[in-house]
Image: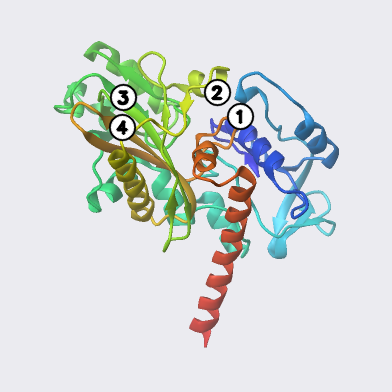
Amino acid sequence: MFGGPSAEHDVSGASALAVLRGLPLDRYRPVVLGVGRDGRWMLVPSSTVEEVAARKTDGPAIQDRLTAAGTEVELRPGGRLVSSDAPDVVLERLDVVFPVMHGPYGEDGVLQGFLESLDMPYVGCGVLASAVGMDKVAMRRAFTAEGIPSVPQVSFTERQWRTCDEPLTLVGDLGWPLFVKPANMGSSIGISRVAEPGELARAVDEALRYDEVVVVEEGVTARELLCGVIGDADEPEASVPSEAKVSGTWSDYAQKYLSAADTITSPANLPPDITAQVREMAIRAFRAIGGYGLARVDFYYDEAAQRIYVGEINTMPGFTARSVYARGWAESGMSYEEILTRLIDLAFARRSSKRQKAMGAGG
């Protein structure tokens, strides 16, 4: 599944295409569902899927993506995929859903809850972890509760911002520059770097386009590190860290998805002790939100102070051709095909475990 009404719709289409190309076809038969910006579920024709999967492009990652177009469908219990116009006609029977969805609706627990209600196995974090991982305020509270260091920040609602006589007081004593973000969004959408007080109002208004809660972080001079996590809640594993090389002052949407330049170094050039700390903190962050399946944890590494901060956790990181998640695992000895197979196996394992628990409770 890909798409959805989120502002990350296009990023999701690019990620889903990479997953489609990486699936071992001797084991899986992919069925592609695109969710339109209007929320309608569309079964993408197999001929279109084959054509797009075989296409080769050298441009920016965001240009190489699937499009949500086809037959409007609904998902019913038992994995039955039926036509919206003819509900008695079963078009496909699905075994597992790989929700390659980024941002609100697909990554925030909403879709996960729907799939749970259908007893449908799905890849990735569950309802709670998805919701906490999507919301930067709840995420930070989970990290704080577990003693995981993070960059100083404040948050406030749109009403608090509009009714405050002295808006600058809402950012308290945070050090400048500041990063202003919507609480629920990813892919650097709605984020602004603010160097002086006069720029704050514009940045807050931009963040409020995407959410009613705004997060303001203190800027730190640091290297940006990223670390993948895979596994269940009991034995998650962390990949070697990668590093995002920033052009300018920060890594914005254009650098991530519109540029053809490769900004990722994997593995990151780090002392062994820092590498070990990042991997250990990635697992702690994963457990702090109750993660399952996969996540990518982003860090700030202040070399001068020898301090590592957890920036955020992404419960469905990008799977584009330049995915740092896949590259980190490749450097750790796990191929892209192996990643996908393991994630799907984990989806079945979780559903099996839940069924056993339900039977035990009923007895």
Amino acid identity at mark 4: Tyr
Residue marked by disc 1 = 10
Give the label, 2 or 3, closer to the camera.
2
Distance, label 4 to label 1, CA atoms, is: 27 Å
Label number found at residue 300: 4
Mark nearer the N terminus (4 vs 2): 2
Amino acid identity at mark 2: Tyr
Residue marked by disc 2 = 257
Nearest the eye: 278 or 137: 278
Mark nearer the N terminus (2 vs 3): 3
Report if the CB atoms under discs 2 and 1 are less than 8 Å apart: yes
For residue 17, side relative to residue 100 (left or right) = right
Nearest the eye: 300 or 267: 267
Distance, label 2 to label 3, CA atoms, is: 20 Å
Give the label, 2 or 1, closer to the camera.
2
Determine whether 339 is above or below 323 in the image: below
Report if the CB atoms under discs 4 and 3 are less than 8 Å apart: no
Amino acid identity at mark 1: Asp
Percent position of residue 31, x then y: 75, 48
Residue marked by disc 3 = 179
Mark nearer the N terminus (4 vs 3): 3
Amino acid identity at mark 3: Phe
Report if the CB atoms under discs 3 and 1 are less than 8 Å apart: no
Q: Residues within 10 Å of mark 4 (few under 14, many from 20)?
A: many
What kind of element bears circle 2?
helix
Q: Residues within 10 Å of mark 2 (few under 14, many from 20)?
A: many
Report if the CB atoms under discs 4 and 1 are less than 8 Å apart: no
Mark nearer the N terminus (4 vs 1): 1
